[in-house]
Image (cartoon, grey):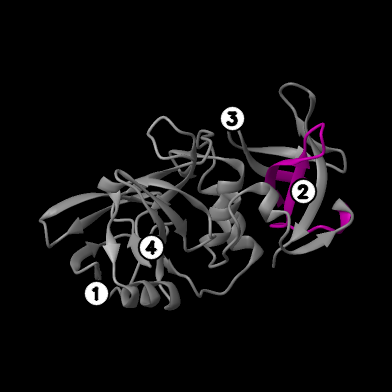
Amino acid sequence: MNYGICEYSLIPVRKEANNSAEMVTQLLFGHTYTIIENGENWHQIRISNDNYEGWIEQKQISQISENEFKLYTSETHNIVSDLVQVVNNNSKNTFFPILLGSNIYGEQNKVFQINWQEYTYNGAFVSSKQKISAGHIIENALMYKNAPYLWGGKSPFGIDCSGLVQMAYYLSGIKLLRDASQQATQGETINLITDASPADLCFFDNDEGAITHVGILLPDSKIIHASGYVRIDSIDHHGIYDSVDQCYSHKLRLIKKII
């Protein structure tokens, strides 16, 4: 079994092994994966955080040893909490941006190593083992406010509905699955929206009954979700109400409590 780590700002992960294929998710700097199939120019991977599978280009693969992989996936690490920040690769004397939700391992005095290379990071971060609170999860989600909707996106420069939910919780040290339909299998079901609390997850279905959308409940009957862009709308037992178009845009199907 081979293992890898993202050493770029982000890497698109595609449904099939070509650049024109659908992007299903993204790897952020410091996120690890298992290589489950080797191709000539593409490799199929399984992402450590959520077991999501997809394809990335051979040119973007950075392999690490099994011992390194086990260390990175088992130890407490730091998570970048700035929207965007510069990291210096001291080994190559270069620098590049990394994004909110990236991982940093073994940082001491702003210096850390990944794959035998030394980096310096001067920005803000939080521990993956910090105390969890609903307020912190909501603050995380608000960091992405007005980010444009991007299918498969997980960054402030483009994010989808389940990516927003996953990253808001990840920044509080909670690992959720990637897609809305998968996230709907996690946590405790809340029967009535009047019984729900801020930071609970609200799921919405289409006309066929399939869950296709998710958002994070806010105080005062509001919800933050990615639809066109990351926005705040009103919600009731029917669903999300779009005040601009003056209609319900999403039909409420399910509420889940994660914390």
Three-letter code, disc 2: Asp
Element on which disc 1 rests = loop
Residue matched to label 3: 228
Q: Residues within 10 Å of mark 3 (few under 14, many from 20)?
A: some
Instruction: Look at the image and give the residue range highlighted in magenta.
Output: 194-223
On the question of residue 223 being in view, the answer is: yes
| First in residue order: circle 2 vs circle 1 | 1
Pointer 4 residue: 103
Q: Earlier in the sequence, mark 3 or mark 2?
A: 2
Q: Is residue 120 above or below residue 10?
A: below
* Distance from Cα at disc 1 to Cα at disc 3: 40 Å
At label 1, counting other C-alpha atoms closer than 10 Å, the crowd grade (few under 14, some 14-19, many 20 or more) is few
Check disc 2 and report the residue beneath it. Answer: 220
Which residue in the structure is indicated by mark 1? Answer: 109
Marks 2/1: CA–CA distance: 42 Å
Between discs 4 and 2, the one toward the N terminus: 4
Circle 2: element type = loop
- Asked whether residue 200 is drawn in magenta, I would say yes
Give the residue at x 54% y 65%.
Answer: 172
Q: Nearer the viewer, mark 2 or mark 1?
A: 1
